[in-house]
Image (cartoon, rainbow, N blue to C red):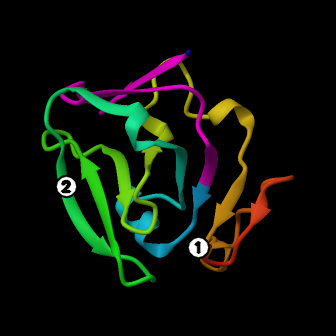
């Protein structure tokens, strides 16, 4: 079984997950835009049981999603890098932010399964070909 590793920018927090992502997703919601300082987040969605922090201790901040449920955002307390999110609406999954993946894996194998919150997508971006397009989540 493959193991994928990642870390924050300064290396204080490291993590890994085993196996392949269940879903690869871009999220264009305005919360993700603000959290990353970019136009979207790119995510490797993996079972929580396959994910673990291997060194360091991330900080977290709880936001409330459109569902009214908690979106727990984890980040490095030293450099501020976005690491992963645990959504209360998906209690068995972890959304690992692809930018922190080691080995040039931020591109998620050049395969995006779904784009969420396309209603909030910035105008200069186009649909990812073959990805399912969702105006919101779910």
* Residue 100 as seen in the image, left or right of residue 58: right
Q: Is residue 49 above or below residue 138?
A: above
- Residue 125 sits in quarter: bottom right
- Residue 115 sits in quarter: bottom right
**Residue numbers of the magenta segment:** 2-25
SS class, disc 1: loop
- Disc 2 packing (10 Å; few <14; some 14–19; many ≥20): some
Q: Is residue 33 above or below residue 45?
A: below
**Mark 2 to mark 1: distance in Å?**
22 Å
Q: Is residue 41 above or below residue 46?
A: below
Residue 31, position as x, y percentages in the image: 41, 71
User: Residue tagged by mark 1?
Assistant: 137
Q: Report the residue at 40% width, 77% height from top.
A: 65
User: Residue tagged by mark 2?
Assistant: 60
Looking at the rendered image, the quarter that the N terminus falls into is top right
User: In this rendering, does residue 126 appear at all?
Assistant: no
- Disc 1 packing (10 Å; few <14; some 14–19; many ≥20): few
Residue 19, position as x, y percentages in the image: 55, 26
Residue 42, position as x, y percentages in the image: 55, 49
């Amino acid at each position: 079984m493959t193991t994928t590793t990642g870390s924050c920018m300064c290396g204080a927090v490291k993590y890994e997950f085993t196996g392949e992502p269940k879903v690869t997703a871009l999220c264009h919601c305005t919360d993700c835009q603000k959290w990353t300082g970019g136009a979207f987040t790119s995510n490797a969605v993996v079972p929580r049981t396959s994910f673990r922090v291997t060194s360091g201790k991330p900080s977290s901040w709880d936001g409330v999603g459109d569902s009214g449920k908690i979106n727990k955002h984890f980040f490095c307390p030293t450099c501020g890098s976005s690491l992963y999110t645990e959504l209360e609406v998906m209690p068995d999954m972890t959304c690992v932010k692809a930018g922190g993946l080691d080995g040039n894996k931020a591109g998620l194998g050049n395969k995006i399964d779904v784009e969420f919150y396309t209603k909030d997508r910035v105008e200069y971006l186009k649909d990812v070909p073959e990805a399912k397009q969702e105006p919101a989540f779910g």
